[in-house]
Image (spheres, rainbow, N blue to C red):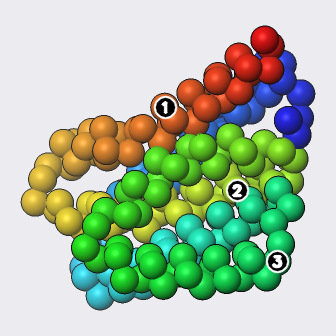
Amino acid sequence: MGFETGLSYMITYILTLMFTFLGVYVGAILAFIAPEELKPGKLYFKAFMNTILVFIFMILLYAYGANLFILIVLGVVASLFLYFTSEITPINQIAYFFLGVVYYFSTLTMDLFIVISSMIFIYGLPLGSMYVARRLKMSKKTLLTDVLLSFGFYVIIALMTNLIALYTMNL
């Protein structure tokens, strides 16, 4: 662990987790505010999401000691993969769930935790906007509830990963 595992760690972990999850809601609210920008910005949102996702994983792997050459090759391969598959599969929504595990592993150091948490928040902005763009015909209340149901597993995965790690450390 990068910082202590007491009560202050859990409070920091949970509050930061809620903050990172709010990125999806902020993105959804931005989509409600400016729906006319969603269609022309779709390509940019996808490129931004894919770039942030690749950077999140590359920074985490680098923090855990991965070789720089391997990171560059993995980054290029992942970027190409995301570019060609994000249109036909909900890969970004699935990747958001895995960010719950990444969120836990970012607790290696406080600096890494801050960087990864901020990037997850930023990743949620276009993710929430794109999600709302596909469902603009729904009511706002229903849509905001749907965002919670669709992306709430990120919070559950991050909490469960942390609890499993704390449990195994205390054995």
Quadrant for the C terminus in the image? top right
Q: Residues within 10 Å of mark 1 (few under 14, many from 20)?
A: some
Q: Secondary structure at mark 3?
A: helix
- Mark 2 Cα within 10 Å, few/some/many (few <14, many 20+)? many
Residue 111, horizontal then vertical, whole percent? 86, 54
Taking 3 as reference, is 46 left or right?
left
Q: Which mark is residue 54?
A: none
- Which residue occupies 51% across, 35% down? 157
Residue 21 x, y percent position in the rendering: 51, 45
Kind of residue at badge 3: Leu
Query: 43 or 31, which lies in front?
Result: 43
Disc 3 marks which residue? Answer: 68
Q: Secondary structure at mark 2?
A: helix
Between the C-alphas of marks 3 and 1, the distance is 32 Å
**How far apart, in angstroms, are the residues tagged by discs 2 and 3?**
18 Å
Residue at (71, 17) in percent of width and height: 167
- Give the mark nearest the N terminus, 2 or 3: 3
- Name the amino acid type tagged 2: Ile
Q: Is residue 80 above or below residue 122?
A: below
Mark linked to residue 116: 2
Q: CA distance from mark 1 to mark 2?
A: 18 Å
Q: Earlier in the sequence, mark 1 or mark 2?
A: 2
Q: Which residue is mark 1?
A: 156
Give the camera-side residue of 15 and 59.
59
Helix, strand or loop at disc 1? helix
Residue type, label 1: Ile
Residue 73 location, quadrant: bottom right
67 displayed left or right of 161: right
Q: Quadrant of the N terminus?
A: top right
Question: Farthest residue in the top direction?
Answer: 171
